[in-house]
Amino acid sequence: MARRTLALYALLAPGIAVGALSCDHDLPLLEFEELQPRGVIEGQVLYQGPPPCTEGGHVVGAAVLYLFHSDGLPPPEGLAPSVENFAALAGDVLFADYVSQLQFNADGSRWCAPEGTPNVTASGDFVISPISAGSFQIRAFYDLDGDYFPAFDYSNLATKGDINGGGILNIDEFFNGGSPKYRDIEIGTKNEQGEYVVPSEGVLLKNVTVGLGQPYTMQRPYMHYAGVVDEQYGNTDPNNIVMPADYWAKDFTLVGTEKSLLRVVFNAGVPDEEKAAAMAPPFNWHLDDPGKLMIYRFDFNGDGVVDDNDGIPETALVPALMPLMIWQKQGQSNPTVVNLGITFADDSLFGSVAFTSKEPVPYDHITVALRPAAICIDSSESPSQVTLVSPYEKDQNGVYIFGEDTSGLKGALAGLTGTVPENVEFIYTCMPPGDYGLNAIYTSGQVWMLPNEAGYCMPREEPKNPDASGQPTECGSRQRLNSQGITVRVGTIAHGRTPEATPDPSHCYEFASDELRERYKKTCLTPAERKLFDEQTLF
């Protein structure tokens, strides 16, 4: 089976029914020539948490299990999640031994246990298959409120109150509030080349325990584009941001860096005119709980503690902050192309430097800077090949943008993308053009995606009542939420070979070597884009 590489955890929308993925991601089919020995994981889901609700004669919710490659974990552990397979366990099955203690209303309406009811324990068996050779981790949650629906990005992940967990080594400690330590599950053994191989008879791994026991305490980071600050290229419309593919920072000194970055302001929730529709069916978003975005410091380097070493990849002086903001190029899954944003505290880099809270602090809005660089991840081989693409090595005054010594940054990027430092390369050329969608991520794995399906009409929804720009305001019987359909466009050419030169895309096709040119094409561009690149019509 080909490895399923999706850029972000947010996009991993495997559902209770096979094929129920978000509209942009279809499950790859097992092709005839790919048939080979596989693995199977069998085990038990252990649940410790609030009693489930009931509705319509059934237990509300389901346990959803994701199987990730160990070198392709979701943020913040990784930047390029790779899901191998999934499983789901319906609430009726998980709570089969407890169902007699639940109440079922005769009219089919929802019943939930009174607040303060003691936690309950339940268990049920699961199976995940088929699984290719490799090392994996299981992440899971129980959809306690029953609002999980895998077909749409706006409803395909856990919300506040759902129960978090996974395949955890320290399960007793986890059930008592400790941080989870996830188990690496090996399918097959390594050969002399260090590659996992499944024997001809396959692999059956039994007695794997998945624990569900800690409630999500935050809501998904609902948000929308609300402003843009751009001293260099004049962007003023947050709904139509265009970033030059050859973005050339003016001043990357300590004082000038912030003004050399394109900054975007996001407000919590949706605009007032969309709020009633967003909180009503079919969306049912929890916008008033709490109606804020949370900023906090986190363990960016993955050493188990949050301290002064958890800075952004360029420098430890600026702390890495949640939500992690990642723009992903739309319309392609491999190679993956992302722009890793810089989340500010109190709207500035200096505000970030002064920010010390490890606990979530609520904000009505946040400011995030787009880096003048793209990260390309080619996961067609393991470990992945990663390329950082920056249009220029130095700013317009000759100051190194990422420093003269990039070895530390290469190591940080390797850790983020689950590869090794020697597989990370820097190339100074134009960023891959296209529309980039945002993924706003908390450490809990809760994510918000822009754009999402609320912002445009689905194929079977009739566009109605166009606005002044010609865009529909309604999709079938529901309102189109314009704030949820926004992307950032990368693609204009603003420079030549020097800051004063007339804009000319020819410099986007010049490389220090043929080897770097081919690496850029392979790790950053789709096959169709490679053809345009060779014809020098991509930019």
Image (cartoon, rainbow, N blue to C red):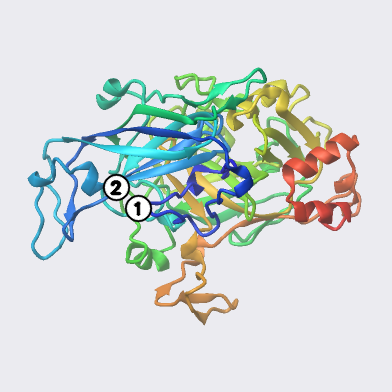
- For label 1, the SS is loop
> Which amino acid is tagged 2?
Ala
Against 107, residue 189 (above or below) is: above
Q: Position of residue 451 (x, y in %)?
A: 53, 58
Eye-nearest disc, 1 or 2: 2
- Mark 2 burial class by Cα count in 10 Å: few <14, some 14-19, many 20+: many
The answer to whether mark 1 and mark 2 are in CB contact below 8 A is yes
> Which amino acid is tagged 1?
Tyr
Against 446, residue 188 (above or below) is: above
Query: Which residue is rendered at x = 51% and y = 35% of the image?
Result: 38
Q: Position of residue 124 (x, y in %)?
A: 25, 38
Query: Which residue is rendered at x = 88% and y = 47% of the image?
Result: 509
Where, by quadrant of the figure, is residue 396 drawn? Answer: top right
Instruction: Indicate which disc residue 62 carries.
Output: 2
522 displayed left or right of 146: right
Q: Is residue 42 visible?
A: yes
7 displayed left or right of 274: right
- For label 2, the SS is strand
- Mark 1 burial class by Cα count in 10 Å: few <14, some 14-19, many 20+: many
Q: Position of residue 2 (x, y in %)?
A: 60, 43
Mark 1 / mark 2, whichever is N-terminal: 2
Q: Is residue 249 visible?
A: no
Instruction: Indicate which disc residue 148 carries.
Output: 1
Against 155, residue 96 (above or below) is: above
316 displayed left or right of 42: right
Q: 68 and 109: which one is in front?
A: 68
Locate the N terminus and report the quarter of the image it occupies.
top right
Q: 412 and 257: which one is in front?
A: 412
Query: Which residue is rendered at x = 19% and y = 46% of the image?
Result: 52
